[in-house]
Image (cartoon, coloured by chain):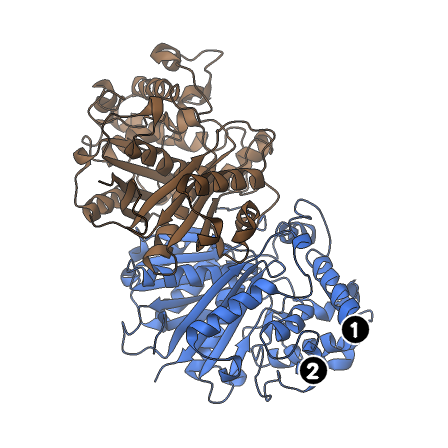
Chain colours: A brown, B blue
Amino acid sequence: MDRRADIIGWHHTRFGRLDKESVESLITASARGALESAGVEAGDVDEIVVGHYNGGLSPLSFTSSLALETDDALRFKPATRVENACATGSAAVLQGLRAIASGDARTVLVIGVEKMTEAGAPAVGRALLGADYDRAGSESPVGFAEIFAEIAAAYFERWGDRSESLAAIAAKNHRHGVDNPYAQLRKEVGFDFCNTVSERNPLVAAPLRRTDCSPVSDGAAALVLTAPGATGSADVAVRSMSQRNDYLPVSRRDLTAFDAGRAAWTAALERAGIGVWDLDLLEVHDCFTIAELIEYEMLGLCDPGMGHTVVEQGLAHKDGKLPINPSGGLKSKGHPIGATGVSQHVLAAMQLAGSAGGMQVPGAERAGVFNMGGTAVANYATILERLA
Amino acid sequence: MDRRADIIGWHHTRFGRLDKESVESLITASARGALESAGVEAGDVDEIVVGHYNGGLSPLSFTSSLALETDDALRFKPATRVENACATGSAAVLQGLRAIASGDARTVLVIGVEKMTEAGAPAVGRALLGADYDRAGSESPVGFAEIFAEIAAAYFERWGDRSESLAAIAAKNHRHGVDNPYAQLRKEVGFDFCNTVSERNPLVAAPLRRTDCSPVSDGAAALVLTAPGATGSADVAVRSMSQRNDYLPVSRRDLTAFDAGRAAWTAALERAGIGVWDLDLLEVHDCFTIAELIEYEMLGLCDPGMGHTVVEQGLAHKDGKLPINPSGGLKSKGHPIGATGVSQHVLAAMQLAGSAGGMQVPGAERAGVFNMGGTAVANYATILERLA
């Protein structure tokens, strides 16, 4: 199989409010876990890539070398931080693949991390708005929700009110998250709760309700990549990975279509030589439910404006034709910004290795990952496949 | 010649207090200039890498896609921000080389940028201290100067007071900077001024005087890399580039020896198959004069503790055996954090292309670049060579 790299080990911390954890402890815990899982000695690592958004969430702005604290044998290893907003984790995965494909590295440690809960709500809102061209530097208690609320409003105006579909997506991902031991929210809440504005499910930024938004989280995930076939024991391979960026200012894009996301996705499928229906599951970027709805269209599961049919028909449910976010997605897992993209790859790898426990999609052989930064500004699509 | 990539074009903005410029305008100006210089159409760019430290200097935390504002043909190009503190620019260069070596890209646009002067002195101090393990989150009007002052004090305790050597380095780099049209400080100030604490040259953090410190700056630099031989017209090649990181906490390292810097430097020379005396010039990281002094030893120009002999003998002067920082270095150029590493590569490329104007080292065929983040925490060494 033509492939970019093998994934030989991984680790995922719990996501959520982790008061005892710091950026440093999250990095070292996930790095140590991934090396152990891979059966790799720290001294055999050739390269370290750290995905960390920060943007004011943590006072330390220079975090690449924290990974060296994992093991003394990591001293003098190259370590680099990469950032692409909410797609920061996937940016780290891609730079890891590049280190291998360039011949500079045989074994790469990729870590995604974010510590968000220490900063307090206003600082979190400010940090996240730092990823928006127009709102950077401004304050908002709801942060990015107001941006995706504008997207939802534009989508509703064009295609009709899809609040019920958003609630159905939220209910699906909450249901899936119950089986994810790393998830922040592991509670089935049901469609009616998600579809009803209430004291416990208020509007955050109309038309988005609390259940339409992913939570603020701490967490890390890590994986170990090797050159294809470098070990005889790899279970999972990265067949293709593509990145496409779009203009940062919202005013320059159609809000209701993730054009650069579609370009990344199409390129990844083409490079892997498969179609979307050849996949057994997808982990996609549901920072807000409206994002997952638009992604159904972007992924080619339905025509533009028809995203609601995907969730109505149960296609995206775990027992559906193409389970989407069997992990519970960002909605249930939580969304520690720099960790999310790595987490998506780790959870897809678990599925392909048959070690996803209660999340397992039976017989999964191929998985897709879609991760985006901003409103489809930085977009990464990956096709992973089970080996042998 | 075995090489990693060719450098086919570049651009360097003026460095200094640029009130009318923003992160965005600096990025697009340098990107446009580099593409023009390379004779490359924007549509032929395969990959964009942006080196931007930020750390609170600018409200926008997600800056990779600003590069797409340069030209509409850049829409949908992959763009990624990388960060390694003061070595952020070189981190961008290395990821650019990797994109080429991996086969993912033939033509890469690398941009380094920083906008510092808008933030105000306390915010600048805080942003820079964000790169230090122990001081991150604290306030200091002098920022990183207190850290390098500790290094200087430790060096003086071990090897004797070298304040005069530091002044000689400052005077040399001020002298060189006069000929650099992009430099922030273009004034010869002389050894006596640098060596005397005065109202105009006060102690910033003893034993470091103002003339021992690089200034706070805005600026950007960009270059265009291609696969080796992709165009017939390249003047300059990157023969080798190596990165080594060290532990972030200062307490875990010998302050007076840049061990990971030495490891990076040795690896780059080895990969290029040359020795330090085969070089015609060096651009090195003189964020503070004590850094350049220790680098003389790290580079292998003299034994440990003997750095002072390099400047005393005039070896590092423009008319010396091995000119060091003929551009004036960070000391004269200024040090817009994310731009510095790219700037060093651009200035070395200018020398090898014979287009360095008043800075020109006659007949330069090979140049070395050394760029570091933190106190030799993230270290990059590059060997560049003239083609044909």
Q: Is residue A356 above or below residue A203?
A: below
Q: Which amino acid does label 2 sit on?
A: Thr
| First along the sequence among labels 1 and 2 | 1
**What SS does tag 2 mark?**
helix
Q: Are marks 1 and 2 in contact (CB under 8 Å)?
A: no
Locate residue A88: give its quadrant: top left
Measured from the top left, where is residue B111 in percent x and y? 44, 61
Does residue B158 sit above or below B172 in this rendering? above
What is the crowding at mark 2: few (fewer than 14 residues within 10 Å), some, or many (at least 20)? some
Q: In this view, does A330 lie above or below B291?
A: above
Q: Name the residue under label 2.
A: B309
What chain letter is assigned to the residue under label 1? Answer: B
Disc 1 residue type? Gly
Residue at point 41%, 43% (across, down): A39
Quadrant for the C terminus of chain A, please: top left
Residue name at image x 65 percent, y 47 percent: B136
A301 vs B130, left or right, is: left
Residue at the image position 52 percent from the left and 86 percent from the top: B361
Left or right of residue B387, residue B91 in this image: right
How many numbered marks, from 0 up? 2
Residue annotated with mark 1: B160
Residue A54: x and y in percent read 53, 42
- The mark found on residue B113 in the picture is none
Residue A99 percent coordinates (x, y) = 38, 56
Observer-nearest of A252 and A339 = A339
Q: Can see residue A56?
A: yes
Residue depicted at x 60% and y 67%: B334
Label 1: few (<14), some (14–19) or many (≥20) C-alpha neighbours in 10 Å: few
Which of the two residues, A22 or A108, is positioned nearer the viewer here? A108
Labels 1 and 2 within one chain: yes
